[in-house]
Amino acid sequence: MSRRTLRPPPLMVFLGSIGLAIFVVPFAGLLARVPWSDLLTLLADDFVTDALRLSLVTSLAATLIAVIVGIPLAWIMARLEFPGRSLVRGLVTLPLVLPPVVGGAALLFALGRRGLVGEPLNQATGLLLPFSTWGVVVANTFVAMPFLVITVEGALRNLDQRFEGAAASLGAGRWTVLRRVTLPMIGPSLVAGLVLTWARAFGEFGATITFAGNLQGRTQTMPLAVFVALESDRDTAVALSLVMVIVSLAVLVGLRERWWKAL
Amino acid sequence: MESALGRGLEAGFGLRRGDSFRIDLRLSIPAGTTVALLGPNGAGKSTAVSAIAGLLPIDSGSISLAGITLDEPAAGVLVPPEARRIGVVFQDFLLFPHMTVIDNVAFGLRSRGVSRAEAMDRARAWLERLDLTGFERRKPPQLSGGQAQRVALARALVIDPDLLLLDEPLAALDVTTRVGLRRALARHLDDFPGPRLVITHDPTEAFLLADEVHIVEDGAVTQSGSPDEIRLRPRTAYAADLAGSNLLFGEATRGQVVVGSHLIHLAERDVDGEVLLTIRPSAISVHRIEPEGSQRNTWQTSIAVMERLGERTRIGTGAPLPLTVELTSEATNDLDLEVGKTVWLAIKATEIGVEAGSVETRSE
């Protein structure tokens, strides 16, 4: 009797297996198509190395910007009472659900040559974001930073603020409290937020191609290169995809289990 | 030589939170004196801690410590918490969970610009003083309650504060270890030369640790005095309940406790060593003649003090064992009690609370 109830329900196992297959089959298909013998030659091509270098540089730059301005934004949302706070939270969450192409178009209208901010910016500094590497960074930041802000904000809300009061009573100024107590105590969430942000920036496609275009060596990141290669050279596309899978897996493994508990 | 008062805490302040809650407190603690704020949860004790520590600005009045004004809204003075020299032992201790014990203790010194080497040396000296040698590299979650309390104390004392402020220092601890730890804490308080303020909801704690007790109800002090004064003459019904128990230290041998020159019988036979007895004033009965019956603790004494408190009357008895007794005023009239009269007291052994006092802080 009791043995029977311990057996997992067959329907659950069946449907769950289909769910798993949805993840496994594409990777199997990709691996089956990898041209192993030509792999190194394919990857040594300028087309590939340019894209990889650009992807790493722009995704890391976007993550850095997210740290510098995203953590303060998360802090403001978690700690300050101000009118329109829920509106702010909505705006920060929007890029998570918005189609990236729409985000890219919005960036173009705002920061393009004739854009709301882009025109005065161009006249004042000569800087033109669309179709530049900086444009890629901006697009990546726009799409990816919400992951950091949302994760850190949640962690700050859950942190017992009395620890910060204890630190202050021991003589720690605001920055010392932040550096030695607040940030270390939300460490796991912070790292998880950073990884999600970086991963999202690394894989960014829609906003980038809309706002920054598709110029090899300047704005053509890995996902864009995969898209282009699919049209012309399937083997290169497979090789590029394999690199992205390996880089993403390496990050997952590198973080180990403990960081994922915070997610 | 500065006077003890000049190095003490002077505080008289009002603070409002929301529409319904306000506190109004007046405190004066000379150096070398322990004062307790005793009151129920929600009476405003923790708010008072926050105000004195500088985590919450006051709305009116002033707080000054060692002759320096820390907070005085009317004069536009507000010293931030990090610039106040106050050692706080917080409720739940609030040890930083991501730091080792020694880093926790050294934190205050490092924050105040002391070099790492010197901070470590001074932290280590305090850990040694509080019997924590060998725990330096542990993380707070790996400590027992008593150890955590001493780390919190070391962390507060290492910065050489002008005031030691303890917020419910024993509440987070296991009941069985509390007695020994309370006594150790009393010793540490005595070693601290400045003013000391203990916040607690536990009357036993307040009466055993403090020289002076302020009872706080609804944000205001309803009574102040020495533990003895409050026990004998509680001015409100709440204070009477709170101040209630007689506390007696004694030496037990097989369930018989010598308290001064008097012998008290306990219900349990297997109690030995130092003990703390608690007897509720209402658990003691008063008789005109020697009572008969099963009670084994009966003796003759005289009435030293009598205080009427509405429908209740509190009596202080004389030798051989001064106790506070509470009766209904009706009973007092029936027995025709007055100061100087000789009466018999009786206490049921089962009404006597016993806490083992010989719990060693090291044996955790």
Image (spheres, coloured by chain):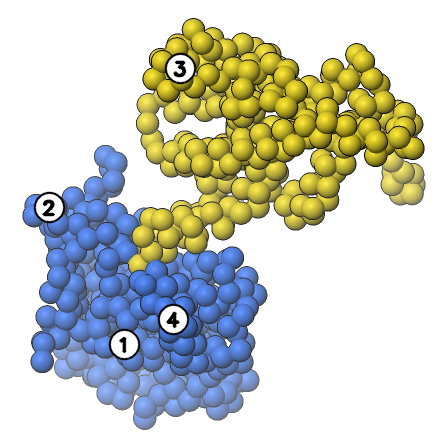
Q: Which of marks 4 and 1 is nearer the N terminus?
A: 4
User: Label 1, label 3: how many angstroms apart (C-alpha)?
Assistant: 66 Å
Compared to A177, does A263 lie above or below?
Answer: above
Label 3 resides on the chain identified as A
Q: Of label 4 and label 2, which has the lower sequence position?
A: 2
| Mark-to-mark CA distance, 3 and 4 | 53 Å
**Residue labelled with disc 1:** B192
Where does label 4 land, which residue? B119
B69, above or below A111, in the image: below
Front-most of residues A38 and B94: A38
Give the amino acid at mark 1. Answer: Phe
Q: Are marks 1 and 2 on the same chain?
A: yes
Residue B340 or residue B145, whichever sits in front: B145
- Mark 1 and mark 2 lie on one chain; the one further toward the N terminus is 2
User: What separation in Å lies between label 4 and label 2 (alpha carbons)?
Assistant: 34 Å
Q: Mark 2 lies on which chain?
A: B
Give residue B93's mark: none
| Circle 1 SS class | loop
Front in this rendered view, residue B161 or B18: B161
Residue at which label 2 appears: B76
Which chain is indicated by disc 1?
B
* Horizontal and vertical percent position of residue A171: 31, 59
Identify the image quadrant of residue A123.
Answer: top left
Residue B149 visible, this angle: no
Measuring 89% from the left and 38% from the top, which residue is drawn there? A7
Dot 4: chain letter: B
Q: Hue of chain B?
A: blue
Identify the residue under disc 3. A122
